[in-house]
Image (cartoon, grey):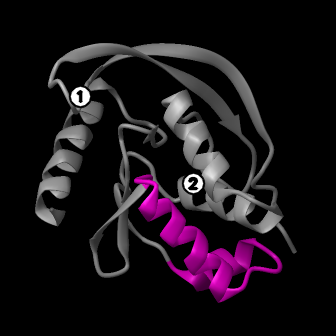
Amino acid sequence: MEKNITSVLVEKIITHKVLNEETGEFETKDFVERRVSAGIAKGWRMVYTNKYQEVLVKVCNGRVSSLLFVWFSSQFNKTHIDVALKYDDAKKVIDGLSKTQYHLVLQKLIKNNFLKRSSRGVYRLNPYIYLPYGVNNNMVYRLQKEWNELEKQND
């Protein structure tokens, strides 16, 4: 049985100042505030619309990959920054999900810089594309700084 993880209602656009990873300066960015229904933590998330849509188009090519993309995104919030993503957990929520589909979508998200592996089986969202539920401006700065450090470690 599929839980309702796809009904997303766009409420409004929010503007925040964030650190630009290339220039090191603060700049104004627009985020989309979304309300999410049952099956995912309640509340809003913020996305950099251009980069988010670019990843969405490259990763989602069908019903299962779209549901899996939403599921991956919903696993993160302000208290769960580094998350162990497991096939068995996704399988409970998404009917018809195979291990191959799961790993293919996960690899596409990593390749498109939406997720980064922080340790074995543990991943982190790119705060320059997607900010999880409940983050504030101070957390945005900290998450972006930690992401930059993680990028340097993987080079």
Which residue position holds label 2? 74
CB within 8 Å, label 1 to label 2: no
Picture layout, residue 81 above or below residue 37: below
Question: For this view, does 146 lie left or right of residue 33?
Answer: left
Quadrant of image for the N terminus = bottom right
Q: Which residue is drawn at 44% across and 52% down?
A: 114
Q: Which amino acid does label 1 sit on?
A: Asn
Mark positioned earlier in the residue sequence (1 or 2) = 2
Identity of the amino acid at label 2?
Ser
Q: What stretch is highlighted in magenta?
A: 86-114
In this orientation, which residue lies closer to the viewer: 15 or 62?
A: 62
Could you say where residue 14 lies in the image, as x and y percent from the top left?
52, 15
Q: Position of residue 137 (x, y in %)?
A: 30, 24
In space, the residues marked 1 and 2 are separated at their CA atoms by: 21 Å
Q: Name the secondary structure under disc 1.
A: helix
Image check: 153 left or right of 94? left
In the image shown, does 75 or 147 lie closer to the viewer? 147
Q: Label 1: how many residues lie within 10 Å, few (<14), some (14-19) or many (20+)?
A: few
Position of the C terminus by quadrant: bottom left
**Dot 1 corresponds to which residue?**
138
Q: Quadrant of residue 72?
A: bottom right
Residue at 59% across, 69% down: 105
